[in-house]
Every structure is written in structure tokens, then in C-alpha cells.
Image: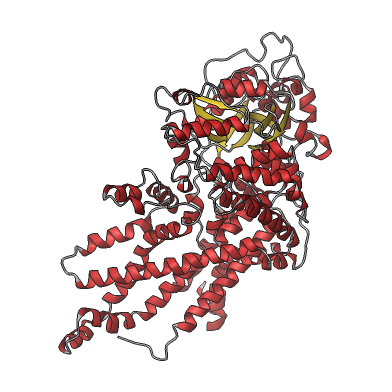
Amino acid sequence: MKKILVFFIAVAMIACMFVGIGCKSTVAETTTATKSTGTETTAATEGTGTETTAAAESTAAGEPVTITYWSIWNEGEDLAKAIQQIADNYMAENPNVTVVIKWQGRDALTKLSAALKAGVEKPDIAQQGFQRLDTTLVQNDLALPLDKYMEEKAYGEDVPYKDIFLSGMFDYWKNIWPGGSIYSVPLYMYTTMWWYNQAELEKYGIAEAPKDWDTFLSNCETIKSQGGAPLILDMYPEYISYYVYWLTYQLAGRGELVMASLDPKGTGFDNPAFLTAAQKMQELVDKGYFVKGYEGYQFPAGQLDWTQGKGTFILNGSWLLTQTKKDLPEGFIPRGFPFPTVDGKGSLTDVEYYHSGFSILKDTKYPDVCADFIKYTTTEESQKIITGTGSEGPVRKGIATFKDVEDYFNSATTSHFFMDNLQGVNAEWYLKVFNPLNQQLITGDIKAEGYISEIKQQTIDFWAGK
Amino acid sequence: MGKFLNKFNRKESIFILIIPTVLIYFALFLYPIFSSLNYSFTDWSGFGSNINYIGLNNYKELLGDKTFWLSCKNTFIYMFFGGFFIFFLSFLFVFLLSNVRTLPRKIFRTIIVLPYMLSPVALANIWGYIYNPRFGLINSMLRLFRLDFLAQAWTSPKLIIWSLSIGIVWFQVGFYTVILLAASEKIPIDYYEVADLDGAGKFRKFFNITIPLITSELEVCLIFWAITAIRMFGFIFAFAIAGDPPTNTWTNAVYMYMLAFGKTTGIDRFGYASTVAVALVISTIVVVGLIRFLLRRKERYEY
């Protein structure tokens, strides 16, 4: 009897193992598949007569279609609510389509990597920053080229889809993506600017935001002389690197930092512009412009203290205003200005774009429907929903957002991608060499000359090991 | 089943019955380990099917990888600095709970163990606020008692690894206290009574009776802590609430994760990350072996 019992327990254990393997992945967060009920809209067909959406065309027989989209947002975040609203509106216009959004958080691509390896449930559409989509999906031939859809008409409009975007949106990426094809479409944009409270600046007697570095330093000195702390930040490696990157960008020019990071002999850092950039960074530290205790500011302590007026200027992504809007006290007038020119070099209209958007996975069953949904997210109405959350920048012309961001985008004579795509082109160097040295520079543990010497040597060592 | 097994002798029957366990062990433990070993010889990014075998190149790179050796150093800081205070406090709590009768033992034990039951991610967030230079608990208390000069930027690059170690000690100490306390409670009271007759004080009894007689359990705790330290990941990773954790806090496990998956920035070198994983396994074996060697005893105490 005992033997029979043991035998059945063993069988049950094996059965559990195979059932566990066969189950759908539980990697995803809770799904939020909702369909609008009741109200139907005619926005998709308004003024366009005989046009139908790709969703309708693809499923002319009324076949229901379900597409899955993995978002980098967590359920409940402002942008998550906005995206859900857009999805609901789309489903109302396309009743046979169900858009299942899985709120994966910032680890969306990590989870996608695991899902691809395990061969379990994976999405039709993935969302991330362009540099991550590129290094994970596009360069590994996992993303669908979207050129066909860019030539088609935009959703509910009579213009080619490619023409609705801000100018220069894809310029950088066409040089990176295989064959110059389009592999990702942006949903919203960020940029990096200096942020401040206009009311506070006026209190210090500073009438307008600085446009050049010397004026910026002069403003810092004015603030410090009146007992204020000119600069504040969170000691998050990326935020520290913004300082060094932007000083380098303005002084050395576009792409120089990336090229120097790729030089196995380190000679790129012999460019005197890098030393000048490091010296200017050191000057900020030596003159005590950073708020007291800044070395210990763990996110979000720095930006919270900025809202409380503990520091005047903060260099950050334009997501800052979305993140802090609930913390801004009454009378706080948030403003932003682009990174000043430095020693007469650089530009105020060479706009930095940080695209976050979509790629369609190559093996999706419904590429046309996925593309149709993506087009819908970039309609005017959808983009207004996105920009309504705070300071997210629109990806198409004519959509209002936070005024200083809008003015900056509208002023663009040229554009470049966030940090010249250093995080995509040379992520390992960025994490292992650039960030740690920048941290030492901003805390005063290393001086400018030592910084240049170290970054050159560590770059050589980095490549020597490859 | 009985009739089926009757065809086999005892040894053969045992073998048949352990097959399911072996299969599960193979699928869930051995296969992933060998799979990792296999990937460690490739340059696979973790995405796509482009996997190229590159021989021992990853291992050669690892030997010269300064970030890897920095992560080893950090791991040993957490292990030794953290371990010293974990076991010092554990023994202190064992002593107090064993000798101070007025202490409410159950409540005290619950309080000590409670942090261990919480999520490391939640704890990391809490400690982030405790260490806040302006309104954090530590600096606020120091200012309250007019000890402003002691207020620090606790998470500055110079201090962050020590600050993280303190947080780790705080949430790990309860687990080891409970084990060592349970071990000490197993010791027959006769030993203490004899010591009392000989005039031994509390400290003498603790060091000469309690500690020697719980050496077996201590060895298990040390091994467990060493493995925990080598695998330390969640608390450190979550402490950097947004974005990539600073490299001067990386353990081997964090470095492995950053190579394979990244956080804000993705290196996407799954093959090389597997190499670090193999190094982790080897270092675990070496450290555990060393602990067992150092704590080996010629005689065993039985009671």
C-alpha cells in the first residue's frame, strides 16, 4: 500500500512540474483589457468618407483581434492612465480589436528577454526608449520594419504618416537602423533642460534665465551671495553625467564624446575641450554652488528639495515636472531653459530629443492592426492626452505642452538624440568608466586633470580587455 | 505498484522511486547551471538567435575586468563587515534573551525578526529616507541632540557602501539570532548548573558553554550568511530607486544582473553575465569550503 502511495505521489510531482512549465507565463502584471461600452465615436471616419482603418480592413469579416502591448509604465502612473485612455478610445472606434496592455514597469524589456528565452507569451508591441529598443530588438532582427506604414496615411488624416512628426525626429536613427528603415515610432518625447522656480529667481533679482555659461555662473554667484544654494541634484549616476555630457557637447561638439569612448587608444580625450569641460565642472564644485549635503541625495530627495526651494537650478529631464507636479507649493512657477552655450560654443537650438515609443515584434500575427493602433496613439487627440499629464513632449507638430519645452522644440534648427545615444552605442563604457569618474568629479574626489588622465587610461584598459 | 516493484530488488526499487526527484532537480537546478556554463562561452546578447561561441574569451576578459574585481571587493565588504556585526549582534541578543529574565522574550524576538520578514525592496526605500541628509531620521536625531557635526551625507559615494551594510545588518540579524537562540536553548541545563556550582558568571558560561556547544549551528549560519552575501542583490538594487545603482555598490550578483539585463542602461551581454555567474558558483564553493575547513573540529559535542 505504501509503495502504491509513494508511486502516486511521485506521479503527482512530475505532473505538477509539467503543468507548471505548460502554464502561461506569469511574468506580466495584471492585464487591463477593457473595451468601451455604449458610446461609439465617429472620429475615425469623420471627414474621410470612404477611408477605413487598418483594423477594419484586416478583419473585414468582423473577426475579433487581440493585440498585446507591454508598457514600461506601472498601472496607476499618470502616463499609464493616459495610455489606457487612448487604448480605450481606439477600441471604441475599432470594436473588433482588443488592446491588452500589460504594465510591466521599467523592466519591460528585461521581462521580454525572459519571455523570448522561455518561448512563452510575448507581446505584439513593446515600448521603451529608442536606444533600448534598438539594442535589444532592432539590432537582433526582432523588430518589424515600419517603412510601409510610414508611407501610408496617418490615422484619420490625409497626409503620409511620416509627415506628421516633428522635424528631424528620425534623422539620427536612420543612420543606426539597419538599411535606414524605420523600426520604432515615438509616443512622447523628453528633453534635458535646466529647471527653476521663476518666483525664486526673481527674488534673487535675476530677471531672465541665462543663455551662456558665464551668465549662468554669475547667476549662481548672485544666488550664493544671498544665502541660497544655486544647484541641486539627485546623486543618480545619469543625472551627474548630464553635467559632464552637456559641457562636453557644447564645447567639443556632437558625437565627440561617443567617438572618444570608442577609441581604444584613448586619444579622443586629448581633445582640449574635454579638459575644459571637466574644469568647468570642477569650478561648480570648488565654488560651493551645490546645496549642502548634495553628495548624499538619493533620488527623489534632490528633486523634492528643489520643489521646497532648497536649491535653485536642477539639470534634469523634462519628466521632472510630471514627477513633481503634486509637490510644487503654491506660488512655485516652474520654468526651464536649455543648456547654455559655453565659451561661445554650442547652440541653444540644437534640440535634444529623447524618444520613448513602440516597436512591433516581427512575429506578430497582426502587424497591420498593431501599426494602426500605434498610428492612433500619435493622432492629435491622443497626443493631447499624453501632454496633458505634465511635461511630456508631443511627437507631432502643433500640440501644446509645457511652454518652455514647446518653445525649445519649436526653436529647433538641428536635433540630436539624448546623450548622443552613448547609452546605446557604448553602454558598458558609460556604466563602468564614465559614470564612476563623473561621480568622483562632482564630489571633488578628483580634479579635472586627474579626471582626464583617468578617463583616458580607463578607456584604454576597457578596450584592452575586449 | 507493489507487484511492479516486487520485480526489483531493494536498491533497484529505491532508484526507481527517486527518479521523479532527480528529474525535477535536473530540470530546475542542473539544467540552468549547465545552460549558464554553456552561455559563458558565447557572446550572446540575450536577444535574438545570434549566438557565437568564443571559447575562453569571456573568462580572459573577466580576469582583467576591474569592475568585476571591484564587485568582488564590495561583496567581501558586505560579507565581512556586515557579517561581523550580524554575528556580534546575534550573540548579544542571544546573551540578553538567555540571561535577562525581565526581557519579554517573545516580543523581543518578534521585533528582532520582523525586518527579515519584510521585502528587501521596501526596506531599501525606508533606509533611503532614513539616510536623507536633510530630513532623514539619523541626521534629524543628531541635530535634535545638538550633534550636527556628526551629521553626514550617509549615501555619498564614500559612505554609501558602509551605509548599505548597516541596512543589511539590520534586516539580516534577526534570522541568525533566531537560529542561534534555538540552538542555545537546546543545551541541557545541567551544564549551566555545574558551572554555577563552580562559581562561573554569566559571561563565563556564555563563552565557555553556550558558544562551544552551538558551534555546529554557528557553522551552518556562517555558511548561510556567506552564500547570502555572495548573492546579495535585492536591497542594493532597490536602494537606487530610480536608475542604475552606482558601481561602487555593486556586488557580483548586481554586476551579473547589470550585464545581462541592466536597469535604465542595458549592456545586454548575457554570455559574459553567465561567466560572472560561473565565477559566483566557484566563489561560493571556495568560501563554503573555507568555512568548513576553518571550523572543523576533532571532537563533536553530543547532548
Report the residue at 72% width, 41% height from top: A134
Which residue appears at 35% of the width and 52% of the height?
A: B149
Question: Of residues B57 and B3, which is closer to you in this image?
Answer: B57
Looking at the picture, how far across and down is residue B55, in whole percent? Answer: 77, 67
Q: Quadrant of residue B164?
A: bottom left
The x and y percentages for residue A334 are 49, 25
- Residue B11's place in the image compared with A327, above or below, is below
Q: Position of residue B125 (x, y in %)?
A: 42, 47
x and y percentages locating residue A417 in the rendered image: 70, 35
Vertical relation: A351 (above or below) B92: above
Give me the residue at 19% from left, 62% from top. Answer: B104
Q: Hey, which residue is sitting farthest right in the picture?
A: A179
Q: Is residue A361 visible?
A: no
Q: Is residue A90 left or right of residue B196?
A: right
Q: State the residue lying farthest toward the bottom.
A: B298
Colour option used? secondary structure
Q: Is residue A20 visible?
A: yes
In the image shown, does B135 or B193 lie closer to the viewer? B135
Vertically, is B232 above or below A133? below
Residue at (38%, 76%) from the top-left corner? B218
> Relative to residue A155, is residue B278 depicted above or below?
below
Q: Nearer the viewer, residue B251 or A329?
A: A329
Q: How many marks?
A: 0
Residue placed most toward the observer, B34 or B76: B76
